[in-house]
Image (tube, grey):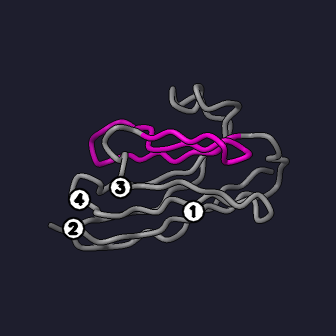
Amino acid sequence: QVQLVESGGGLVQAGGSLRLSCAASGGTFSGYPMGWFRQAPGKGREFVAAISWTSSSSTYADSVKGRFTISRDNAKNSVYLQMNSLKAEDTAVYYCAVGSDIPRLRLRIVDYWGQGTQVTVSS
């Protein structure tokens, strides 16, 4: 079955950086966009970023634009999230996902979810 496994989370000071990775297996991901979401304690899961299969198109939530960069390596069935200038409000569990198209991903219409990785930013 399809599995998405995130890694790279941890504890970092405000202003620092982290790089999250997500490895996909058990399915065919050719042609599908991938994305990142996050869920802070007591809040709903929110869209963070998404990238097309060819990497020609990417989109970000306003709250992370200019600080986060999404990328992917199709040969490794992997997607990454480089997070710079981290803030305390970026603290959340981060999830990767596969969807049918980017507009649906932005609406949290997702085909597969990962199990999440915790990111904690201390102020």
Amino acid type assigned to the residue bearing label 1 in the image? Glu
Q: Nearer the viewer, mark 2 or mark 3?
A: 3
Categorize mark 4 by other alpha carbons within 10 Å: few (<14), some (14-19), many (20+): some
Magenta-colored span: 33-60
Disc 1 from disc 4: Cα separation: 21 Å
Q: Are marks 4 and 3 in contact (CB under 8 Å)?
A: no
Q: Nearer the viewer, mark 3 or mark 1?
A: 3
Name the secondary structure under disc 1.
strand
Name the secondary structure under disc 4.
loop
Amino acid type assigned to the residue bearing label 4 in the image? Lys
Determine whether, in the image, residue 31 is placed left or right of residue 5: right
Categorize mark 1 by other alpha carbons within 10 Å: few (<14), some (14-19), many (20+): many
Residue 72 percent across, percent down from the top left: 65, 57
What number is the disc on residue 87? 4
Question: Which residue is identified by label 1?
Answer: 6
Residue 108 percent across, percent down from the top left: 52, 31
Instruction: Work out whether residue 121 or residue 74 is closer to the camera in this orientation and state it.
Output: 74
Write the residue at 39% across / 38% down: 61
Question: Which residue is identified by label 3?
Answer: 67
Instruction: Work out whether residue 48 or residue 120 is closer to the camera in this orientation and state it.
Output: 48
Amino acid type assigned to the residue bearing label 3 in the image? Arg
Question: Which residue is identified by label 2?
Answer: 14
Q: Nearer the viewer, mark 1 or mark 4?
A: 4
Quadrant for the C terminus, please: bottom left
